[in-house]
Amino acid sequence: MADLVLRPLLEPDLMAYKALRDAMLAGHPQAFTSDAETEAQRDIASYRSRLAGGSQGATLFTLVALDGARLVGAITCEREPRRKVQHVAHLIGMMVSDTHRGRGIGRALLLEALARLRATPGLAQVTLSVTAGNRAAVGLYESQGFVCYGSLPDAVRLPDGRQLTKQLMRLGL
């Protein structure tokens, strides 16, 4: 991980971000709510909403992990735009390339995201959802203090008929 760089997603990264996302959705359909076929049709420009301040300011940031010049991981944090719930942020789209799994990149992305969230005025908690059977991801989130506050059975239906439960987790900041 000596060459690993974590930084915010920039406009020139959008093509590599889309390529990573498309590969992750296709290779791990059980891990994501979005489906590969629909997302593959998205225009690269549609990912501009993942840049800081995108989507009417709801996206706080997307962090990317770079191994040299190669984008190998990402995580996005959104903030509720409505005044009464602006103290809540949501982590979405955590992904690490299959070629780079097991190297601590997901942990590094999560730690950096949490540091940035803790430094953001007015935030009190962060939530996420994770496929209940994804033990590695659940373990990572629990190791940083996230606790389960519920689950949503039949949250995702895969083309092969499997129905997946999403575990809902939160962390007080």
Image (cartoon, rainbow, N blue to C red):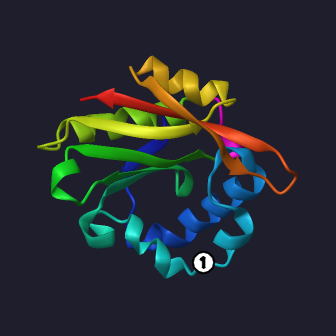
Residue 173 percent coordinates (x, y): 24, 29
Asked if residue 3 is positioned above or below residue 93 in the image, the reply reads above
Q: Mark yes or no: residue 1 visible.
A: no
Given residues 84 and 9, the one toward you in this image is: 84
Given residues 111 and 160, the one toward you in this image is: 160
Residue 122 percent coordinates (x, y): 12, 43
Residue 81 percent coordinates (x, y): 24, 60
Dot 1 lies on which element? Answer: loop
Given residues 41 and 157, the one toward you in this image is: 157
Q: Which residue is mark 1?
A: 42
Asked if residue 93 is positioned above or below residue 171 in the image, the reply reads below
The quarter of the picture where residue 145 lies is top left
The magenta-colored residue range is 98-102
As drawn, is 117 to the left or to the right of 163? Answer: left
Residue count near mark 1 (Cα–Cα under 10 Å), binned few <14, some 14–19, many ≥20: few
Given residues 68 and 157, the one toward you in this image is: 157
As drawn, is 76 to the left or to the right of 26? Answer: left
The structure residue drawn at horizontal position 45% and vertical position 31%, both measured from the top left corner, is 169
Residue 14 percent coordinates (x, y): 49, 70
The structure residue drawn at horizontal position 40% and vertical position 64%, both measured from the top left corner, is 50
The structure residue drawn at horizontal position 74% and vertical position 51%, both measured from the top left corner, is 157
Q: Mark yes or no: residue 71 visible.
A: yes
**Magenta includes 45?**
no
Q: Main secondary structure of the magenta part?
A: helix
Residue farthest along the right direction in this orientation: 160
> What amino acid is found at the position of numbered circle 1 in the picture?
Arg
